[in-house]
């Protein structure tokens, strides 16, 4: 029994040593926990810049690709002649419309540092740009095979099989235990021969090709060659790397910031109103029932002329009014009858001179007046009130319906001239010395305004300020809300940049992008104030003499 106990203890000790230790790692067998190899890298490149141009040269597959841009605006320069001093002597780059310049450079396939001088000629202007191109030496290293006696390798291998092979390993352990018992029996008789046999078996076991399995080839084959690709990416320090090829796809453009004196602007809320001198209301002077003219009621947007009849109002007649009118008509009829008889007598007496000629004429005039009064009473009962357009324009408001009862002074139609519109803004401070003004209608459209005046009476604790819209009025409508930027005579010194250069970062803060290098951009948090319809004033966060991205900033902000 002591013999069996010693055999089991020996086998258990061996298994413990094989399965213990930090080499139990599997799923890739990253025993040294090395840093992951990058999946891409940048091609060797060199850059140079002057006051006029910015140049980036990229070496790839024995070809030198050259990107030439304007330094201030980042606009590609086409049609330039580029001569390069290379290790192979002076050479000229080839150019195709819409593509970068290219130069065959077999020498760029060898590692080393190469001093290059680019001479750029464009429209009789010559610019010399020196730079250095470094081609790194990247050896194709291979990892050697693991030593067969490596404790970590052995333990890792056994640990992997223990965790992945499951039941098969359990039966293998039982078989090993039985074999151990047999081996111990042999050891008692032929110890040296058994130990030699055990050592040979161990060498065969741990160096056998069967130890390699899926994803665990410990021969460590040669690492694959890295793919060379230029990708736009956000750097750990917050900067953004954008290759020149991507910059041209995104159409990134920059300007040089300059400090200067700019008039102060005030941002005001407002809305569009019709010109008071080119608009009018159509109202009923008396209450009554509406009726349509010939052709029907004009609908919204219908052009009308001054004096056009737009509707009729039939005033209702009360019973007492009808009684009064009938009584008045009877009185007038009686007076007309009396005057007619008197006129007949005067006409017979007038030829003989019994009455004066003037008396006859007065009687005739009196009779005509009574008939006119009688006729007006008849028309008052029959003719409705005609509602006419007071100005030329279009119908902006009003949807009358036949038979509708209109109250006295009710607005039936609102007529405006769409080519004469104003803007009424609200200011909490008195505007003094308004130099100019613009309005943003909310669709990135800016319209020019002319200051008309401001009120002296508060309206909802604000001062109404009115402006006339200049230029094109198409697409504008009365009642539309706008944002007014009124420029005053007060000036402040600083930077003025286009509104398109502003973006918001993940924190909601307004930032701009500075072009710090040929292919590098950095965020600059800024605080801005309104200046006019197209520009904003940078109060803090950016100095003069910097290249600022003014086109494509939103696309640049999406790079991750």
Image: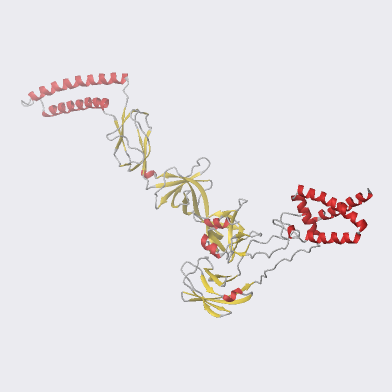
Res. 541 in view: no
- Rendering quarter of residue 558: bottom right
Give 253 or 387, whichever is nearer the viewer: 253
Q: Name the residue furthest left.
A: 352
**Residue found 22% across the figure and 21% down from its top:** 332
Q: Give left or right: position of 414 versus 457.
A: left
Rendering quarter of residue 559:
bottom right
From the top left corner, tell me how far across and down residue 118 is, in percent.
55, 76
Query: Which residue ends up furthest to the right in the rendered image?
Result: 2
413 relative to 40, above or below: above
Q: Is residue 190 left or right of residue 219?
A: right
Q: Nearer the viewer, residue 390 or 148?
A: 148
Q: Position of residue 484 (x, y in %)?
A: 49, 49
Q: Is residue 486 above or below residue 125?
A: above
Q: Nearer the viewer, residue 113 or 155?
A: 155
Count of labels shown? 0
Q: How is the rendered protein coloured?
A: secondary structure
Could you say which is closer to the camera, residue 89 or residue 129? 89
Residue at 44 percent of width and 42 percent of height: 479
Residue 55 appearing in the image: yes
The quarter of the picture where the C terminus appears is bottom right
Q: Where's residue 531, x and y in %?
A: 52, 55
- Where residue 110 sits in the image (x, y, percent)? 62, 75
Q: Above or below — where is 385 with respect to 332?
A: below
């Amino acid at each position: 029994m002591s013999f069996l106990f010693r055999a089991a203890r020996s086998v258990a000790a061996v298994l413990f040593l094989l399965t213990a230790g930090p080499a139990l790692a599997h799923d890739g067998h990253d025993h040294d926990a090395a840093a992951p190899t990058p999946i891409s890298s940048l091609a060797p490149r060199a850059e140079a810049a002057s006051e006029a141009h910015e140049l980036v040269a990229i070496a790839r597959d024995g070809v030198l690709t050259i990107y030439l841009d304007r330094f201030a605006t980042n606009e590609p320069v086409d049609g330039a002649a580029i001569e390069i001093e290379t290790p192979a002597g002076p050479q000229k780059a080839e150019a195709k419309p819409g593509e970068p310049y290219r130069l065959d450079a077999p020498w760029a396939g060898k590692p080393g540092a190469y001093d290059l001088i680019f001479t750029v000629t464009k429209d009789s202007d010559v610019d010399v740009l020196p730079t250095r191109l470094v081609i790194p030496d990247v050896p194709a290293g291979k990892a050697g095979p693991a030593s067969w006696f490596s404790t970590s390798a052995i333990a890792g291998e056994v640990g992997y099989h223990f965790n992945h092979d499951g039941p098969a390993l359990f039966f293998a352990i039982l078989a090993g235990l039985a074999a151990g018992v047999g081996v111990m029996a042999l050891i008692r008789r032929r110890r040296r021969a058994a130990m030699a046999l055990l050592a040979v078996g161990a060498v065969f076991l741990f160096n056998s090709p069967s130890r390699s399995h899926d994803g665990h080839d410990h021969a460590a084959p040669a690492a694959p060659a890295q793919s060379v690709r230029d990708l736009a990416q956000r750097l750990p320090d917050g900067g953004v790397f954008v290759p020149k090829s991507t910059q041209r796809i995104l159409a990134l453009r920059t300007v040089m910031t300059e400090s200067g004196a700019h008039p102060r602007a005030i941002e005001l809320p407002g809305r569009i109103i019709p010109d008071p001198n080119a608009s009018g209301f159509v109202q009923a002077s008396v209450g009554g029932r509406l009726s349509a003219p010939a052709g029907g009621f004009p609908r919204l947007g219908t052009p009308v002329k001054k004096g056009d009849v737009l509707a009729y109002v039939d005033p209702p007649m009360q019973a007492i009014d009808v009684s009064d009118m009938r009584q008045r008509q009877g009185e007038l009829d009686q007076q007309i009858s009396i005057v007619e008889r008197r006129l007949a007598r005067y006409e017979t007496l007038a030829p003989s001179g019994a009455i004066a000629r003037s008396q006859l004429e007065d009687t005739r005039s009196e009779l005509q007046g009574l008939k006119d009064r009688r006729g007006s009473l008849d028309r008052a009962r029959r003719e409705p009130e005609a509602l006419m357009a007071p100005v030329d324009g279009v119908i902006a408001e009003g949807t009358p319906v036949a038979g509708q009862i209109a109250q006295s002074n009710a607005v039936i139609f609102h007529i405006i001239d769409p080519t004469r519109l104003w803007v009424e803004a609200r200011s909490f401070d008195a505007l003094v010395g308004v130099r100019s003004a613009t309005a943003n209608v909310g669709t990135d459209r800016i319209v020019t305004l002319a200051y008309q005046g401001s009120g002296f009476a508060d309206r909802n604790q604000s001062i109404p300020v009115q402006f006339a819209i200049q230029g094109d009025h198409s697409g504008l409508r009365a009642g539309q809300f706008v944002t007014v930027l009124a420029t005053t005579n007060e000036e402040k010194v600083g930077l003025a940049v286009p509104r398109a250069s502003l973006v918001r970062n993940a924190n909601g803060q307004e930032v701009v992008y500075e072009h710090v290098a040929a292919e590098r951009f950095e965020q600059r948090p800024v605080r801005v104030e309104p200046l006019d319809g197209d520009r904003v004033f940078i109060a803090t966060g950016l100095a003069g003499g910097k290249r600022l991205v003014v086109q494509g900033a939103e696309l640049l902000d999406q790079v991750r």
